[in-house]
Image: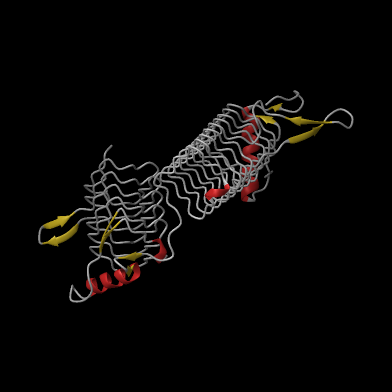
Amino acid sequence: MSAAPSIIRPLDFTAVKAVIEAHGRYLSGRSGGKRANLTYVDLSNMSLAGVDLGDADLTGARLAGASLHGASLKRAILFGCDLREADLRTCDLSQADLRGACLRGANLAGANLAGCDLREGSIALQGNGQSFKILKHERRPGELDYAVLQGANLSGAQMSGTHAISADFTEADLSGACLNGAKLVNAVLDGADLSNADVFHADFAGATMKDAVVSGVRLDDANFERVDLSEVLRAPPPIVYVDDRPLGDLINDHERYCKSGGVEGQVMKVSRVDFRPLKQLRRRMLTGMGAQKSVFFGLNMEGAELQGCDLTGADLRGVVLRDADLRGAKLIGAKLNKADLRGAKLGPLMIAEGRFIRTDLTRAVLKGADLRDCHARRARFLEAELQGVKFDGADLLEAELET
């Protein structure tokens, strides 16, 4: 950031620490508290990992190269900040004002930017007399060029006009984000969720969007020249038919088969079927169902009985499987990114005296999934992608986990 010495003021770490401590008292309502005012302060390359600066004012601050890993900047004012190459991994920036901030090369992997404002902006400061001068970055303000946002939450973010050339949004949540006029040339958006994002006049030229979710996105409104759109998940049809029968009827037949012990109904064995039109499968009895490579994206399947199901290669991203019974289920290569599996049963399924079928999650993708308090005894997680998985309280006795 280039500016006159009188604008950016130095502050040593002891003074910064005192400001942060007073801010902590302010946030908790204790005596001696004072809201942090770090406007136009040089905090570049400073170690601020884990600090709580929620609601703080850091307008125009220089934070280039700073370590803010795991910090809270919720609702903070970061207007016009220099955050180039800052470490913002898992940082909470929800509802933060990042207008005009420069995030070139910053690492925002796993950060929460829900509802933040990343639009362009500039700061005008009164100079000598009646004139004004613009506080300028060395690079373009409001840019995310080359930034890392893998798995970041940008749902509902205001990003119109944002420059994010060659940025990495792999598996990021951009649902409902406003990307009007944004420049995402050569960006990586593989596996990203762009559900209902506004992309009017956005430029995605040369980007890769393999396996991205584009449900509710008007693709004709943006430039998708040379974009890899292979295997993107588009909006679901209003109703799905299998062999001229509505999918809902097949589910009902399968449930009758389970409840009657095979006397009524029929076992459902399908593949590559989109279950999203059903809206939810909460507490349904689907024991032994076959649905290889089928789509369940975002469905509520809380408490469902899925013992012995074959869900090989299924898309279960963001699915609620809390307290579901998945004993003996085959989930080989399934996509379970950010799925809610709290309290789920993933242990072995007894099929006869002394005989069990283990739950198989070999090569499954569980990035960011929540497996707290789940029961996963003897479950197979061989070659599974487990980055960011929450295992607190999980029973993993004899589970096959690669270390």
Residue 65: quadrant of the picture:
top right
Judge by depth and name the residue closer to the eye, 269 or 32: 269
Residue 131: quadrant of the picture:
top right
Tell me the colour scheme of the image.
Answer: secondary structure
x and y percent of residue 216 in the render? 51, 55
Judge by depth and name the residue closer to the eye, 207 or 366: 207
Residue 160: quadrant of the picture:
top right
Residue at image location 39% in from the left, 58% down from the top: 320
x and y percent of residue 249 in the render? 32, 72
How many discs appear? 0
Residue at image location 17% in from the left, 55% down from the top: 357
Q: In the picture shown, does residue 1 fall above or below 239?
A: above
Q: In the picture shown, does residue 42 fall above or below 162?
A: above
Q: In the picture shown, does residue 112 fall above or below 100?
A: below
x and y percent of residue 166 in the render? 52, 33
The answer to whether one can see residue 302 in this image is yes
Judge by depth and name the residue closer to the eye, 379 or 366: 366
**302 horizontally vs 22: left or right:** left
**330 horizontally vs 41: left or right:** left
x and y percent of residue 182 in the render? 60, 41
